[in-house]
Amino acid sequence: MPRQIIGVSGSLARPSKTHALVTAAVCRAAARYGIAGAVHDLDDLFPSLGQARSLSDLAPEARVVVDRIVAADALVVGSPVYKGSYTGLFKHLFDLIDPTALAGKPVLLTATGGGEKHTLVIEHQLRPLFAFFEAATLPTGVYASTADFADLAPTAPALLDRLDRAVAQFAPWLDPPAAASAA
């Protein structure tokens, strides 16, 4: 099975800044490490996600998405900020995943919001969530505000530099020599 990086966008809107940011990270990582990449939105799990009490309650198409998330070699996750935190359905998706399923998996944390006052959502909300899973969250998280986008594309030079720094931190898991020796 080819190595892959999967993006999870916790946005309910299409198009969205969160989807654009997660996609930019996945594309940069896939190109840098020569692996396959794909991005899934919460919409890809509807309508069964909101009704599911366990993975077995998901529709077959939604279950395929969750299985891809769990099987990925690396993840990029992102959520828009609502009232100081990630979206409820984003959290619900991860509530359905076995607590050991993401152990050791490298995860790049991202978030988007209307302004700079939400920048700590990565440290105060997302990092603890993925610490529970014992995932290997990358040291650099990437937050983007509305001012960092033009036509729903991340364009701010400082944002793109930070994104490249974060993607480079996947190297111990995704660099071909490192990945071969880990296998």
Image: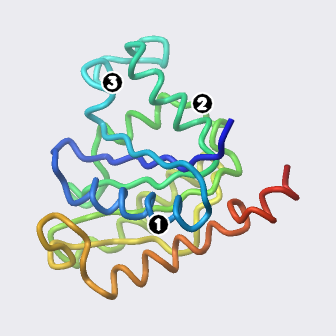
Please tell me in which quadrant of the rendered image residue 71 appears.
Answer: top right
Left or right position of 106 against 164: right
| Amino acid type, residue under disc 3 in the picture | Leu
Q: Is residue 172 above or below residue 95?
A: below
Q: Which of 68 and 100 is in front in this view?
A: 68
At x 68%, y 60%, the residue is 174
Nearer the viewer's eye, disc 3 or disc 1?
1
Q: Which of 39 and 99 is in front in this view?
A: 39
Q: Nearer the viewer, residue 81 or 106?
A: 106
Image x and y of residue 44, in percent: 31, 31
Q: Name the residue under label 2.
A: 98
Point out the tag, 3 or 2, that comes first from the N-terminus: 3
**How many numbered discs, if any?**
3
Image x and y of residue 82, in percent: 20, 55
Between the residue at mark 2 and the residue at mark 1, the CA separation in whole angstroms equals: 28 Å
Q: Residues within 10 Å of mark 1 (few under 14, many from 20)?
A: some
Q: Marks 3 and 2: CB-CB under 8 Å?
A: no
Q: In this view, does 142 lie above or below 51?
A: below
**SS state under label 3:** helix
Q: Which numbered tag is attached to residue 49? A: 3
At x 37%, y 18%, the residue is 52
Q: Is residue 20 above or below residue 88?
A: below
Point out the tag, 2 or 1, that comes first from the N-terminus: 1
Between the residue at mark 3 and the residue at mark 2, the CA separation in whole angstroms equals: 15 Å
Left or right position of 109 against 111: right
Q: Name the residue under label 1.
A: 28
| Amino acid type, residue under disc 1 in the picture | Arg
Image x and y of residue 168, in percent: 58, 74
At x 22%, y 76%, the residue is 117
Left or right position of 127 against 48: right
Q: Residues within 10 Å of mark 2 (few under 14, many from 20)?
A: few
